[in-house]
Amino acid sequence: MAVASHTVREARSPRGNFPHLSGLSAQRQVEFLTLRVAPALTGGVIAWHHFLSEWQGLLVFACMFASVTLLRRPRYPLHLIPLASAIR
């Protein structure tokens, strides 16, 4: 009986597990892990397994992570910069 009342009380109270994590923040963290870290980590593990060298695996991880980070940089609003339309 105590367990049932405890679960009802939990259902009625607002979730306070992650008060610092908003929906947008969670989406950014998931995007960071799945689109930047995971491919670089996978490439590093494959290189480490293929070459049997931790340093080469770490090098592949670092290069892949750097390239993905540079390619996914936020774009600047070029319509707000007066000379951007002439340079493009």
Image (cartoon, rainbow, N blue to C red):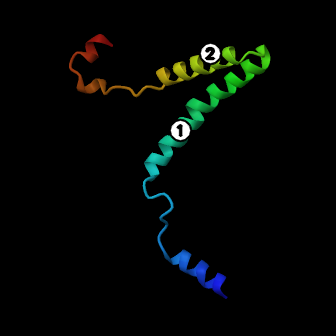
Secondary structure type for disc 2? helix
Decide which of 11, 84 is in the foreground and name it: 11
Q: Is residue 45 above or below residue 14?
A: above
- Residue at image position (45%, 46%) is 25
- Foreground label between 1 and 2: 2
Query: Which three-letter amino acid code belongs to the residue tagged 2?
Result: Leu
- Residue at image position (63%, 32%) is 38
Q: Which residue is mark 2?
A: 59
User: How busy is the neighbourhood of tag 1: few (under 14 within 10 Å), some, or many (20 plus)?
Assistant: few
Would residue 46 appear left or right of 23 to someone viewing this image? right
Q: Which residue is mark 1?
A: 31
Secondary structure type for disc 1? helix
Q: Is residue 42 above or below residue 57?
A: below
Q: Is residue 14 above or below residue 3?
A: above
- Residue at image position (77%, 13%) is 51
Decide which of 60, 31 is in the foreground and name it: 60
The answer to which of marks 1 and 2 sits earlier in the sequence is: 1
| Quarter assignment of residue 64 | top right
Image spot of residue 26 (x, y percent): 49, 48
| Quarter assignment of residue 30 | top right
Image spot of residue 56 (x, y percent): 68, 14
Judged from this view, the residue extending furthest toward the top is: 87
User: How busy is the neighbourhood of tag 2: few (under 14 within 10 Å), some, or many (20 plus)?
Assistant: some
| Quarter assignment of residue 57 | top right
- Check whether the beta carbons of the residues at disc 1 and disc 2 lie within 8 A of each other: no
Image spot of residue 1 (x, y percent): 67, 88
The C terminus sits in image quarter:
top left
Q: Alpha-carbon distance for marks 1 and 2?
A: 23 Å
Would residue 17 appear left or right of 80 to someone viewing this image? right
Query: Which three-letter amino acid code belongs to the residue tagged 1?
Result: Glu
Judged from this view, the residue extending furthest toward the bottom is: 1
